[in-house]
Image (spheres, grey):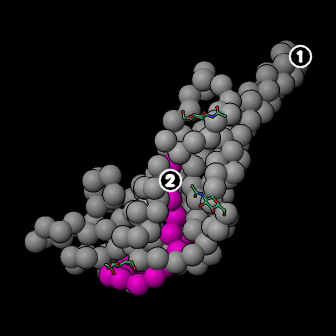
Amino acid sequence: MFGLLILLVVVDIGVRVKIYHLVVEKPLQTRFENHTKEQTEWQELRESYFYCASTEKKNWTESRKDCMSRGGDLVILNNKEKQGMIERMKIHGDSWIGLQSSDEWTAKWKWVDGTDLAYGSWRDGVNVKTEPESKAFTDQQGLWMLDKTGLKYWICEKKNVQHLGDLKPEKNISKT
Ligand SMILES: *[C@@H]1O[C@H](CO)[C@@H](O)[C@H](O)[C@H]1NC(C)=O
Ligand SMILES: *[C@@H]1O[C@H](CO)[C@@H](O)[C@H](O)[C@H]1NC(C)=O
Ligand SMILES: *[C@@H]1O[C@H](CO)[C@@H](O)[C@H](O)[C@H]1NC(C)=O
């Protein structure tokens, strides 16, 4: 019985190490993309998403454009696990996230993928009822606030499209 337990632990460690390689190799390669100025570094959550925090400030629209140019979008913090990841991540200051008001007459918060706001981590005292043109940002403690404009850091999120079975190393990192 004890032997079996040991075996299970060893197998478990093996799997974890493999996942670690899978997850980490890709972002390390990504780091060598020609982003000399920003020195960005993707951080991973499980094997599903990569995150990267900007080192410069832009307005919300320009921040979103930057994420899209990297094959991602502004981060969608729609559950506790992703929120926890952002709290552990080193962000440089107040950072835009992918939450904005819809432009209907009755403005509502919408994530950049079009989904409604269900989970939230608003700072106490923030009136989360939105008005048109509102954008959300997180502080370094992971509390959200809103603003209409201004320059802030931002956080991008990118889905890891590499499947566990598909282990071919990508030698040729080209943007196309
Ligand atoms: C890559 O970096 C070099 C030197 O910093 C720069 O001149 C070049 O334009 C960059 N290329 C791309 C595709 O960003
Ligand atoms: C965001 O910044 C860009 C580039 O500086 C500017 O052209 C654009 O008007 C700004 N948008 C907003 C909403 O401030
Ligand atoms: C990388 O891919 C591009 C486009 O698919 C190709 O033109 C180029 O020759 C490749 N480079 C290497 C080193 O394989």
Residue occupied by mark 1: 3
Which residue is painted at 64% across and 68% down in the image?
37
Q: Residue 122 occupies which quadrant of the picture?
A: bottom left
| Vertical relation: 29 (above or below) 126 | above
Q: Position of residue 12 (x, y in %)?
A: 76, 27
Range of magenta residues: 141-158
| Vertical relation: 144 (above or below) 157 | below
- Closer to the chain start, of discs 2 and 1, is 1
Residue occupied by mark 2: 70
Q: Is residue 89 visible?
A: no
Which residue is painted at 25% across and 76% down in the image?
133
Task: Name the side, left or right, on which 68 lies relative to 51.
Answer: left
Q: Nearer the viewer, residue 142 or 103?
A: 103
Q: Amino acid at mark 1?
A: Gly
Which residue is painted at 43% across and 55% down in the image?
68
| Vertical relation: 105 (above or below) 163 | below
Say if the magenta span includes residue 154: yes
Q: Secondary structure at mark 1?
A: helix
Ligand 3 - quadrant of the structure image: top right
What residue occupies the far left of the structure in this picture?
Answer: 105
Q: Nearer the viewer, residue 73 or 121?
A: 73
Q: Residue 92 occupies which quadrant of the picture?
A: bottom right
Task: Name the side, left or right, on which 24 lies relative to 151.
Answer: right
Q: Position of residue 79 (x, y in %)?
A: 46, 53
Q: Amino acid at mark 2?
A: Arg
